[in-house]
Each structure stands twice: as C-alpha cells, then as structure tokens.
Image (cartoon, rainbow, N blue to C red):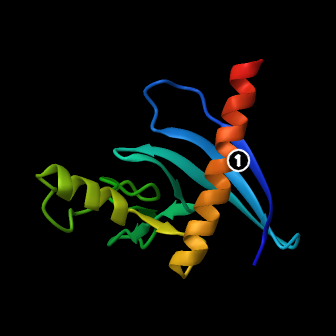
Amino acid sequence: MEITEVRIFPKEGINNKLRAYATITIDNAFVVRNIKIIEGKTGLFVAMPSRRMKDSCPKCGHKNEVRSKFCNECGSKIPVKRAEPVTPEEQHDARQSEHKDIAHPITVECREQIQKKVLEAYEKEKGKAHSI
C-alpha cells in the first residue's frame, strides 16, 4: 500500500483541538476523506473518519443520535440507558462510544504510515501559511 496523495484542510480557531481535516489517496485508486488532525495532551494525532451512533426510539423506532433526550420523529422522551458518567475518564469514554469509525487501519504499521504521512503534510501546510 502506498499513500500517493495527502491534502490538508486547516481549521481556524485558537481554542479548537481540531487543527485540520485531511484527505488521503491510496495507490492512486482509493480515497479516504475527513481524517481529523487533533491536538491531544501529548501532541498531534490522527483520527479516522467516524459517524455518530444511533439508538431507536422505544415508541416509534426512529433512529436518533445516542444520548438524545427526545425523539426527532415523535417527540417522546427517550429513557436514559445508564447513569451519566461522573469522572473525566468516564465522560471521555462515553464521548468515544458515541462515535464509530467508518474506515480505519487494521494493523499498527498501517496506522503509523497514515499518521506519519498526514502529519508531515500538515506540517508542510502549516509552514506555507506562516511564510505568506
């Protein structure tokens, strides 16, 4: 597998942990969009594209985003499935479980290769912005 192209789309905002989105092309044949470049506690990292999980309304069956309080279809109250997280770690885990990756590398080597290429392209893009 070869990453043949990386495009970076910087995001504005000083207090935002999301620094940019990236699009990668693999072997000039397959594109993955909406890869996120995020500023974490230990530096930048790459997060794969994901979507919010959905739960069915017990009354009408409509799919609503996880942790919704009311159904978007019938308006009925959706019961809480479990107690709200208390510690910061529990809150972080709860937020993580609300999203599911759409595409992701299976091996550590693949993840490292994607992260390396994307972060290199991000640093180049950041350098271009500072030199203008």
Q: Quadrant of residue 112?
A: bottom right
Q: Residue furthest bottom?
A: 106
Q: Quadrant of residue 40?
A: top left
x and y percent of residue 74 in the render?
42, 59
Count neighbours of disc 1 (C-alpha within 10 A) and say few if under 14, some if 14 to 19, many if 20 or more: some
Using residue 2 as the reference point, say whether residue 87 is left or right of it. Answer: left
Q: Nearer the viewer, residue 103 or 82?
A: 103
Q: Label 1 sits on what residue type?
A: Ala
Q: Dot 1: what SS?
A: helix
Q: Is residue 77 visible?
A: no
Q: Residue at x 63, y 64 (%)?
A: 114
Number of marks in the rendered image: 1
Q: Is the C terminus in the top left, top right, bottom left or bottom right quadrant?
A: top right
Q: Nearer the viewer, residue 51 or 114?
A: 114
Using residue 114 as the reference point, say whether residue 61 is left or right of it. Answer: left
Q: Is residue 14 visible?
A: yes
Q: Residue at x 70, y 47 (%)?
A: 121
Q: Nearer the viewer, residue 41 or 83?
A: 41
Q: Quadrant of residue 109?
A: bottom right
Residue with the mark numbered 1: 121
Give above or below for 58 relative to 80. Answer: below
Using residue 19 as the reference point, say whether residue 128 is left or right of it. Answer: right
Q: Residue at x 30, y 53 (%)?
A: 69
x and y percent of residue 101 in the render?
52, 69
x and y percent of residue 63 in the render?
46, 67
Give above or below for 29 relative to 119. Answer: below
Q: Residue at x 59, y 27 (%)?
A: 12
